[in-house]
Amino acid sequence: MIDFSKVTTPTPTPETAHFFQGTAIGELRLQRCDLCHEVYFPPRPFCPACGSKAVSVFAACGQGRLLSYVINHRPHPAFEGPYAIAIVVLEEGVKMMSNIINSAQTPEALRLDMPLQVVFRTISDDIVLPYFEPVGGDS
Amino acid sequence: MKSAAVAIVGAAETTELGKIPGMSQIQLHADAALNALQDAGLTLSDIDGVATAGESPTAVAHYLGIAPNWVDGTAVGGCSFMLHVRHATAAIEAGLCHTVLITHGESGRSNVGRAGRAAAPASLSGQFEAPYGGMGPTTSFTLPVLRFLKDTGTSIEQLASVVVSQRQWAMKNPRATLQTPITIDEVLSDRVIAYPFTKSMCCLVTDGGGALILTTAERAVDFPQKPVYLLGSGESTETPMISQMRDVTSSRAFRMSGARAFESAGITHSDVDHLMIYDAFAHLPLYGLEDLGFCTRGQAGAMIASGETSPGGSLPLNTNGGGLSYMHSGMYGMYALQESVRQVRGSAAAQIKDVNISVCHGVGGMFAASGTIVMSGSRFR
């Protein structure tokens, strides 16, 4: 239902390059503060909780749950039919926007708090994006 | 005793609202500004401060032929005008300028002379939200609501009752875009825009503008209109990305802005005679009532569904019909301020009896920013 070749392409910056280098090899990279241990997203080279520049990149486990979503009914060139735009909470505690793929795009199939896992899809020569799917396949 | 230092002495909207294809965006600013000057009995040469959003204050001042001593171009979305009121109050009190013009104009429907606002692909929103198919406010502002409904025990019917309540106010307002009665069933069975939101739960898309003129409280008594004193205010921001709200069921910016406004005005909730909560979508009054402390968590839906905020209720809310039924050009905050001014002056279409305190609460972006203004008919309290 997603035409990945028509997805709006992000332009990485020096601060976010590690994230997209990670998705290209199948890693969902987050950052953690070496001092206060805050895990945060989106990327930046300092800790938004304490301001420390001592931060490390690490790979998230890829598991999360469905926090909230809408099902957009207006036409979008990259999507066929109504599609969900979701906020996913990762097991590490951070939130990300994403789409829920390999699932019906209906309120019945998309239950709040359902477990999700990350999957990766290539959208351009340079960019691979993280998406999420229900744990255990199509619901 | 608290004493207001600054008052609103001029307030007006554009001559027309709704569809205005014959006017560019900058002219909508000017039309509202000239109407506000007339309302205040002033001329352009009396203005020495300019604040605006959507256009630069440089552009507005130049277009109107004003040579300002002070400008503010704070642009944090639809509540920018609440922040302009707050900043102008501080500037006048500090003696930086004497008479400030705050303008808004937006060709939201007709798109005459209006810039686009897509997220840059290298911005954080462009990298981490835009790829997932967001269509602007209808899919981002709405994104938290399923979680809000679940965690607060609010029903979809209660969410729909926001639309019904505000339509009842709009039916009393001849300038409102939508004036036909509507039921909860009609709201829920309307065309789906972004589940669970139907078209009726989303704001209008219209053209219009508004302007305010502020000056010192000492001078305010000499103007033709009853002064509307600025008792207190608050402002804050949270995040430009809806997916990064700390708690998607409550706005930190609302809580901080609201608490600061009440504290600085020296008022409690029982002092509030009239309330405006910026309603780009039907859930915003629910967040606003809870985050400003007008009810406990999870009670806002029941409060609105019971009619407490409707005509005849104890807490009149969004009495112009709101962004859902009155008008919404894109940055609606100016129209909420205009209605608070009218209610305190006693000149609103759906006038509440004896409004002494009006609280006007705005949102900017998608829960990105907030501004809250407390207005009063009395200078001292």
Image: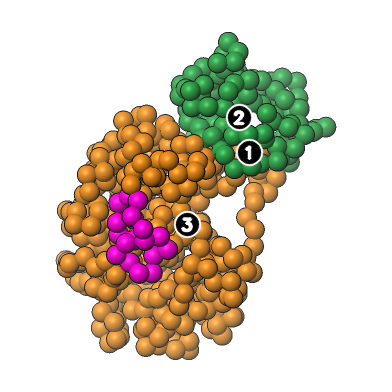
Chain colours: A green, B orange
Q: Quadrant of residue B98?
A: bottom left
Task: Calculate the distance from the C-alpha at mark 3 to the C-alpha at mark 1.
Answer: 22 Å
Pointer 1: residues within 10 angstroms few (<14), some, or many (20+)?
many
Secondary element at image label 3:
loop
Residue B293 showing in the rendered view? no
Q: Give the residue type at disc 1.
A: Gly
Secondary element at image label 2:
loop
Q: Give the residue type at disc 2.
A: Asn
Are marks 3 and 2 in one subunit? no
Identity of the residue drawn at 51% across and 58% down: B205
Residue B133 bears which disc, if any?
A: 1
For mark 3, what is the residue? B204
Identity of the residue drawn at 39% across and 45% down: B187
| Relative horizontal placement of residue B45, taking residue B174 as reference (left or right) | right
Identity of the residue drawn at 29% across and 65% down: B172
| Relative horizontal placement of residue A17, taking residue B11 as reference (left or right) | right
Pointer 2: residues within 10 angstroms few (<14), some, or many (20+)?
many
Looking at the rendered image, the disc whose residue lies closer to the viewer, 3 or 2, is: 3
Foreground: B134 or A125? B134
Q: Which residues are magenta?
A: B164-182
